Image: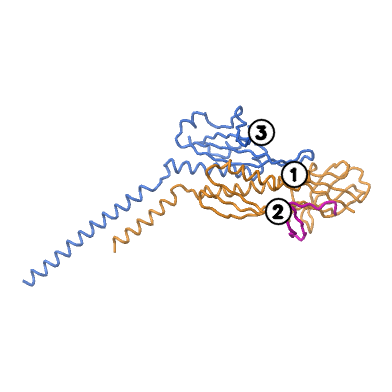
Amino acid sequence: MIALMIISIGAIMYSAGTYYRYEQWEEYITLVEHVKLSTIRLVEISLANYTKSENNYILKDNLDQWQNDLRKAYPGYGVILTYDLTNATHQVHGTNINYSQGLAFHWNENASYSAANATFALNITSVGLEGYKFMATAFLNLTILNVDPPNDVITVAVTGEDGMPITNLRKDNFQVDELNVTTVTSHYHEDYILVYKIQCENLQSSSATVTVWDQRGIKVIAKNT
Amino acid sequence: MERIGMRTIRNTKGQMRVIETILSSFILFSALAFVNIFAVLPSSPKYETSDLEKMGHNVLHDLDEQGLLSRFVYNETEWGELALALTIFLPPDVYFDLTIRLIDAQGNPTIINKDFPIRYGSPEVFTASNSTASVSYIIPGQSYIIPEQRAEYDPRILVLQLVRG
């Protein structure tokens, strides 16, 4: 009986020792996190490109290259990333978005947006990881709340994929028709939490067109009609 | 006769206890010796390499999450800043050597910072060490907020080598 107990304890100690032997699991967690973060970045870059080039296949082309380059960056790991681009209508924060090849934009409205959506599955064959699924969504919404020609001020709200306001925008991130933007200040708002007041020169009409680029380079054009 | 018989039985039981104890001790020491073969202590080079790899991954991941990594990597003028950032993030007894690789037209990674080493510690430290950790990290491209510039897929593979001094 004692001998059996000793062997059992030995087996437990052996498994504990081998579990921490290389600590591979932690290395692969960081690898999975890295692939996920970089893939989301790529979706954002592709959306930023799409909002300037209007090339509907840019996300697909970029992801095809990304699949190959991931294998080159991690030789021997067996990193296989597969993707599925959204080609249907999805609702994001109350807005119905009609995606085509994972991309969509709807501009020149009071509330305009640019969006990207794709689902991924990651395999790392060297460690037996299979079918780790994650979703990459990029979204930028611009809403013109008020145009005040007498004071040369336009009030806008800019929100991201989480529905929360984008807080790090400056004068360089906005363009109003062909007018010169003098200052951009952020203010508290009851509904949107944070709004931007764009001060520009010679705002004569209440039908203004505002363009915004966030720090990721994603563009949206909204028009107050 | 009965007394002698009882003594013999008692003596035999005592002997068995001794044999049992010896056997138990033998099994116990064998089990400990067996486990000790597989145990990796903190001073082991294997543990050190794994530890450094984790550290390297975390540093690059943190810089990337803050949006600093792509800014540093895609602007040659900021490679000095990247070296400084890595020096700050990593412990002072860890030496590093970062190479930035571009995937050329043939699909092969080519080092682009040969003339500008992003390094802390002399090159001999890395060649002399027998436990160098190597971390690969790929970034897909850079974002621009300037209207004239378009974000493009332009990957860079970073290879960070780490050695404890």
Assign the N terminus of chain A to one quadrant of the image.
Answer: bottom left
Identify the subunit bearing mark 3: B
Mark 1 → mark 3, Cα distance in angstroms: 24 Å
Check if residue A97 falls in the magenta segment.
yes
Three-letter amino acid code of the residue under disc 3: Glu
Q: Residue at x 66, y 46 (%)?
A: A64
Compare residues A75 and A169 and report the one nearer the observer.
A75
Q: Can the viewer see residue A171 in this picture?
A: yes
Crowd around label 3: few <14 · some 14–19 · many ≥20 (10 Å): few
Q: Closer to the observer: label 2 or label 3?
A: 2
Instruction: Tell me which numbered mark, 1 or 2, is placed earlier along the sequence.
Output: 1
Task: Write down the region rendered in magenta.
Answer: A87-109
Q: Residue at x 53, y 45 (%)?
A: A77
Q: Is residue B137 above or below residue B124?
A: below
> Which disc number belongs to residue A117?
2
Three-letter amino acid code of the residue under disc 2: Asn
For chain B, what colour was chosen? blue
The image shows a total of numbered marks equal to 3
Q: Which residue is mark 3?
A: B78
Q: Is residue A84 above or below residue B115?
A: below
For residue A179, which quarter of the picture?
top right
**Where is residue A59 shown, x and y percent of the image?**
71, 47
Q: Secondary structure at mark 3?
A: helix
Q: Which residue is mark 1?
A: A49
For chain A, what colour was chosen? orange
Identify the subunit bearing mark 2: A
Three-letter amino acid code of the residue under disc 1: Asn
